[in-house]
Image (tube, rainbow, N blue to C red):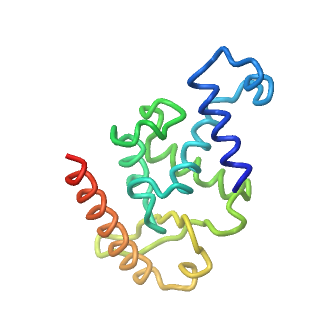
């Protein structure tokens, strides 16, 4: 993860100072998709907003990624994130193995029907739970994150 933080700092420097030739030489010309993946990974690592939860939906991710309070964490325009794109990008993060097997996807059951869950951390734990248990855990965690975010925002005001 130390390497990821180094890359993140370099990308930040590149974005903030496009005239920095050494950063451009090192990174080449990162694609928008690379920057989107880096943004999602940064939000996960730093537990930004709802990313504090181990379990999220793609819609939850988009909610945080497009929240103007977290604009300073973005490496790309927030308009580039949709639930479908985020779900595909999360799968790419899993496929790249950046997480060392700690992330996965699963289906959780809620009364309205099945829902795709994105497991950000500790996938071994959640993959042993039933679909309804995963959904219940998701509800507890996401509500706690929302409460924490509201209290942080109120304290800042």
Q: Residue furthest right?
A: 25
In this view, 104 is above or below 24:
below
Which residue corresponds to the image point at 39% horizontal and 75% vertical from the top-left?
A: 135
Q: Position of residue 49 (x, y in %)?
A: 39, 54
Drawn side of residue 32 relative to residue 52, left or right: right
In this view, 115 is above or below 36:
below
Q: Position of residue 28 (x, y in %)?
A: 77, 26
| Image quarter of residue 26 | top right
In this view, 118 is above or below 25:
below
Drawn side of residue 3 relative to residue 125, left or right: right
Drawn side of residue 52 relative to residue 127, left or right: left
Residue placed most toward the observer, 76 or 114:
76
Query: Which quadrant of the figure contains the N terminus?
Result: bottom right
| Image quarter of residue 36 | top right
Residue placed most toward the observer, 119 or 130:
119
Which residue corresponds to the image point at 58% horizontal and 25% vertical from the top-left?
A: 15
Which residue corresponds to the image point at 48% horizontal and 46% vertical from the top-left?
A: 84
Which residue corresponds to the image point at 73% horizontal and 26% vertical from the top-left?
A: 23
Q: Position of residue 114 (x, y in %)?
A: 40, 70
- Please tell me how many numbered marks the rendered image carries: 0
Drawn side of residue 97 relative to residue 119, left or right: right
| Image quarter of residue 147 | bottom left
Q: Residue furthest top?
A: 19
Q: Position of residue 134 (x, y in %)?
A: 44, 78
């Amino acid at each position: 993860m130390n390497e990821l933080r180094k890359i993140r700092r370099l990308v930040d420097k590149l974005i903030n100072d496009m005239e920095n030739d050494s950063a451009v030489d090192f990174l080449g010309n990162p694609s928008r998709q690379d920057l989107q993946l880096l943004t999602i990974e940064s939000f996960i690592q730093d537990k930004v907003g709802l990313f504090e939860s181990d379990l999220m939906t793609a819609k939850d991710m988009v909610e945080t990624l497009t929240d103007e309070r977290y604009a300073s964490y973005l490496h790309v325009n927030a308009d580039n994130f949709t639930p479908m794109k985020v779900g595909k990008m999360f799968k790419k993060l899993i496929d790249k193995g950046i997480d060392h097997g700690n992330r996965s996807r699963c289906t959780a059951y809620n009364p309205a029907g099945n829902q795709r869950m994105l497991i950000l951390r500790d996938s071994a734990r959640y993959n042993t739970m039933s679909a309804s248990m995963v959904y219940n855990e998701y509800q507890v965690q996401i509500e706690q994150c929302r409460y924490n975010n509201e209290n942080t925002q109120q304290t800042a005001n």
